[in-house]
């Protein structure tokens, strides 16, 4: 039987992967890291919109609007591990090349342990209202 980890070992473990992704369209490369568990929950919650309030029984929709820019903004970091973009940058980031955002989104999703099926399942669970997204993840 493998040795059981202690609380301290678990909390001190460096378990977030990162990857340098070339972006020749922008003239260089960016560092992308995976989401923490808390950040992944926040990202997934950002996909869900409750219509008319926030209590049980209200209609819920999934919004995939600007989903690529939202994830990229959460996962692109500097050498110190700090986010390059904050939530206020998502709209402007969403105006960048769709092919670049798609490439970075795929890396961020993979490093965060999310599959395309995970994102699609969230959308399907909540009515699949795509609010202006092309529908392709």
Image (tube, helix red, strand yellow):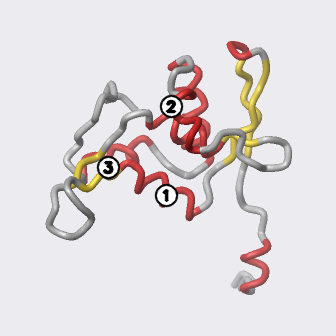
| Quadrant in the rendering for residue 23 | top right
Q: Are marks 1 and 2 in contact (CB under 8 Å)?
A: no
> How many labels sit on residues?
3
Report the quarter where the C terminus lies. Answer: top left
Looking at the image, tell me whether mark 3 or mark 1 is earlier in sequence order.
1
- Say above or below: 89 vs 62: above
Residue that carries the numbered disc 1 in the rendered image: 42
At label 2, counting other C-alpha atoms closer than 10 Å, the crowd grade (few under 14, some 14-19, many 20 or more) is few
Q: Which residue is disc 3 drawn over?
A: 121
| Callout 2 secondary element | helix
The spot of residue 73 in percent (x, y) is 60, 40
The front one of 111 and 47 is: 47
Kindly report the distance in space between the C-alpha atoms of the residues bearing marks 1 and 2.
18 Å
The residue positioned 56% from the left and 40% from the top of the image is: 88
Q: Position of residue 121 (x, y in %)?
A: 32, 49
Which disc number belongs to residue 91? 2
Is residue 126 left or right of 12 when viewed as pictured? left
Spatial CA span between label 3 and label 1: 16 Å
Give the position of the N terminus as an image quadrant: bottom right
Find the residue positioned furthest to the right: 79
Q: At 61% across and 53% down in the image, what residue appears?
A: 35
- Which callout, 1 or 2, points at the residue further toward the start of the chain? 1
Q: Position of residue 129 (x, y in %)?
A: 23, 40
Q: Nearer the viewer, mark 3 or mark 1?
A: 1
């Amino acid at each position: 039987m493998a040795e059981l980890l202690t609380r301290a070992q678990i909390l001190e473990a460096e378990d977030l992967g990162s990857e340098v992704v070339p972006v020749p369209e922008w003239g260089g490369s960016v560092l992308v890291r995976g989401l923490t568990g808390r950040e992944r929950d926040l990202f997934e919650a950002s996909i869900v919109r409750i219509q008319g309030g926030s209590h049980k029984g209200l209609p819920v929709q999934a919004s995939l609007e600007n989903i690529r820019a939202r994830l990229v903004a959460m996962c692109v970091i500097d050498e110190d591990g700090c986010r390059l973009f904050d939530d206020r940058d998502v709209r402007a980031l969403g105006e960048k090349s769709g092919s670049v955002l798609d490439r970075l989104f795929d890396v961020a999703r993979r490093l965060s342990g999310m599959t395309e099926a995970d994102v699609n399942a969230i959308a399907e669970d909540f009515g699949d209202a795509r609010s202006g997204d092309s529908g392709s993840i």
